[in-house]
Image (cartoon, rainbow, N blue to C red):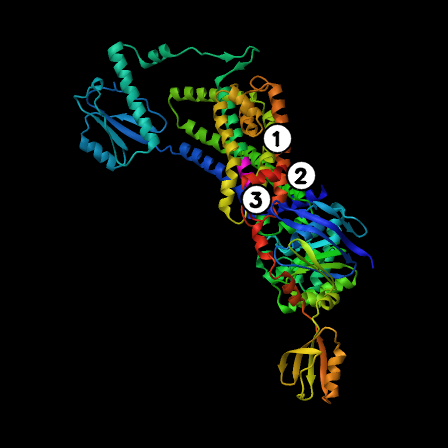
Amino acid sequence: MNKIWIIARREFLSRVQKKTFLLTTILLPVVIFGLYGLIIYLSVKSSENYTVAIADNANVFGGKIDSKDDIKFVFVKDESLVQLKEKIAKKELDGYVWVPEDFKPSKGDTISVVSGKTVGLMNREEIQKRINDALENQRLLSSLQISKKQLDSLQKGNEVKFSTTEGKEENDTKVGISYGVGYASGFMIYLVLFIYGTMVMRGVMEEKTNRIAEVIISSVKPFQLMMGKITGIGAVGLVQFIIWVALTVTLRFILPLFVPDMRETANVMNHGANEALQTAKQSGALDNLMHGLSDINFPLIIGCFIFYFLGGYLLYSSLFAAVGSAVNEDPQDAQSLTLPITMPIIFGIVIMSSAINNPTSNLAVFGSLFPLTSPIVMMARIPFGVPNTVPYWQLALSMLFLICGFLCTTWISAKIYRVAILMYGKKPTWKEMWKWAWRKN
Amino acid sequence: MDSILELHNLKKYYATQKAVDDISFNIKQGDIFGLLGPNGAGKTTLLRMITGIFYPDSGSITFDGRPFEPENDIIKIGYMPEERGLYKKMKIGEQALYLAQLKGLSRADAMQKIKFWFKRLEMESWWNKKVEDLSKGMSQKLQFVTTVLHEPKLIILDEPFSGLDPVNANLIKDEIYGLAQRGSTVIFSTHRMEQVEEICDHIVLVNLGKKILDGTVADVKQQFKENKFSIKLAGIPASVEDGAYQIINQQANEFTMKINEGYRSNDVLLHFINQGIGIESFNEILPSLNDIFIQLVDGTKSVTRAFQNLS
């Protein structure tokens, strides 16, 4: 036991002290969040005023187009095309719309916006929408004698709510959030299994090809060497994960400090009453989101995540260790040998993507109980609610199976490992490895 | 003296071959013991059983007077395998410390011993270097240090001099003598017979998984002597031929001869003395271990056997 600890310590320190560890652990989330922040910042910031002159010779807009934020529509009369172009050249205008006298909106005629320089995507969409809304409004007025607002209120649907028999209200946001959280945690587990599993495999291969395995095995039992490696790398993974969570939480607190500021500046530029309404609506959605998030049992999810992370990791890493021990110098051997191990992980992700849409289906239940896929599939189901979606017995059984599963794979892998780690030359066949696994000492 | 290691009828069979087939021998405490044999003879398997890496299929090992318990006795053994390496990216000092701790030494204890050995072999400046910066000979030296660091009672060295220059080889050789003098027993496995002749007290030769020779170096040579002598005379004798011996080779006044059955060396000397010829030197030619090795191993399927185990 003491020796496993010594080995694990070396495995842990030798990885954590590497520069690449610092880079991937701390820099990566910072860079991702930085980019994310930058995108938000830029999208809010791109509020340059944009003025479009409307020369409505056919009076199709009825003299009114809603201006929004930074896009202004100015109606001009008695100005020739040449004058408009001059104004653009003088930067008094950014663009103009020339509606010919014979323009008929009902006929689907094209309206063209002429601008001095190319219009950005966001502004372009906004201008399109405004012009179309105004045209639609005019069409409704002229043919049905109702305004767009009236039509909207007529078309507005009644709210349809879902709730369970226990009386719990399930709003859409909550299901959406469960979906998101489930997908994210399932996918995280999938990544963890791959990244740390292959890290174990590489470590074992390194020991074998460096010919240090026999030196060490003359001091410790092969099982201790294998478990030490698995423990050490598992600890690296756990530390990395905890740092990521901590960073995410801090950055989430820091980021809004910049963003509301930006939102305010945007609001100041906002003049239409319509916009105030929109903001109110938005904050309502935000409240809803916060409410949905608070409905989700995060301590349970994080607890389960750590359990399935460790369980899944232990289960697969010992298999990866066995494969690593069987590989000789040729990295291509590793590829063909890892395939049977990566298959169940991929099945896991396939079952997960179905389970996330239907978390109580037979397939989802099977996938979350079967130890080779349960870490991925169960993590996708848990955010939908315990015990509503995942009954306690399923959770308990799944955890029990996972523990049995990893004891079983570790036992088999250890037997393959102790033979293969000292075997040089030819790559062993599956048949041979199978024999080693069941051979008595 | 007591035996430090006794092997009793050790057997280890693989699916396609008998790697070690009923081998027994004793090693005395403080001996330098040579384990010889061609490639694929079963030496490595035998050493792996002695170091507790493999369990024998049958037979028993007695270590230091008690049945061998790999778990506890491992700290008393230092094994330098033929296939040996180090962690390339690890610093030399840390590596030595790590390997010593795996042997069961405490950190402080290990540190002290590493410093002692590093100083002794002039390796102090290496501490913060990485293994990948070392030459093959240098890492060999480091491996030797990590093998003997915990002052094991039994030191097993598989081809310890491969890749060492003569200066460093001598350095290591002296250390081996020193360790033996301080009471450690050394098992020495190699193909290089001249080294065995020089260093070893006792040898065992294995081939095809069986022991075919066991004894001290002197005994073995006596056992395989062919009654060959070399004689250097003051002049060329008139009559060279005699019933007592056959001339194998003549170079001017120097003769190599084989004494026939039933005669002794005195008969040869008398033959020349009676002729009144002065004898400048007279020596028995003992076979070298190399000759004995080749004589015993040549013609057996020892080499093809190495390929058979792959099938």
Q: Secondary structure at mark 1?
A: helix
Q: Which mark is residue A440?
A: 2
> Hey, which quadrant is residue A438 in on the image?
top right
> Hey, which quadrant is residue A326 in on the image?
top right
The answer to which of marks 1 and 2 sits earlier in the sequence is 1
The answer to whether one can see residue B197 in this image is yes
Q: Amino acid at mark 3?
A: Ala
Q: Secondary structure at mark 2?
A: loop
Q: Which mark is residue A326?
A: 3
Please identify the residue farthest to the left as the structure is shown: A102
The image shows residue B24 at horizontal and vertical percentages of 74, 53
Q: Are marks 3 and 1 in contact (CB under 8 Å)?
A: no
Residue drawn at (47%, 19%), measured in percent from left and top?
A: A284
Please identify the residue farthest to the right as the structure is shown: B1
Q: Which residue is mark 1?
A: A405
Q: As displayed, is residue A281 above or below residue A83?
A: above
